Amino acid sequence: MRRTIALVSYGIDRFCRAAGIGFLSLMMLLVLFQVLARYIFQAVPVWTEDAARYCMIWGGLFGATVAFRADRDPRLIQPPQTGSKIRIIGYAWVRSVAVVVFLGPVLYHSSRFLDRGLHRLNEGLQIPMAWITVIVPIAVVIILIHLLARLIGPDIGQSDRKS
């Protein structure tokens, strides 16, 4: 079971890396298109600005899940890598509790957040805002899966990124 959770986390991480790169690349292309359309053709389609913004959000949140799994996310203090095993484990559990305390309410309130978004249309893309903001609970669930894998599973796929 431990290995299964670690493999699921690894597979999700590979998907999130590709998706993050894809969304940020698409954002770059959309911004380039906006610049060209504005200065060469003197006309910019309305939807490109919104699409670029939402690509940035999706790419950033997928990137946040990758950073969390790679243990490269921002933090106030650096947990100890050496020292007594009890201290290292204690820091890991304190960090885990902090992640759950921070992300738990976000996930808990996501259904109402998405429900409100279903009734609001984005002006540029003409789609419900819920389709744009659904990345928030997706990212939270992915981070919680990575946290679970870190707590109980073997370290699959981490050795190639620690260098």
Image (cartoon, rainbow, N blue to C red):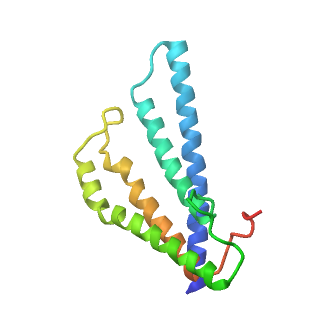
Image check: 97 left or right of 119? right
Residue 161: give x, y in percent of width and height: 72, 63
Most foreground residue, 116 or 42: 116
Q: Residue at x 60, y 81 (%)?
A: 89
Q: Look at the picture and state if 14 lies above or below 4.
A: above
Q: Is residue 105 left or right of residue 83?
A: left
Q: Nearer the viewer, residue 129 or 41?
A: 129
Q: Residue 4 in the image: state x and y as whole percent.
A: 57, 81
Residue nearest the observer in this picture, 79 or 113 = 79
Taking the image as drawn, is residue 59 in sight?
yes
Who's the residue at 44% across and 66% down the image? 141
Instruction: Say which quadrant the C terminus sits in.
Output: bottom right
Q: Please, is residue 142 above or below residue 36 in the view?
A: below
Q: Is residue 140 above or below residue 129?
A: below
Q: Quadrant of residue 157?
A: bottom right
Rendered residue at 25%/58% (across/down): 112
Is residue 5 something one can see in this rendering? Answer: no
Q: Is residue 88 above or below residue 53?
A: below
Residue 24, by quadrant, is top right
Instruction: Indicate the quadrant containing the N terminus: top left, top right, bottom left or bottom right.
Output: bottom right
Residue 122, image x and y in percent?
Answer: 31, 38
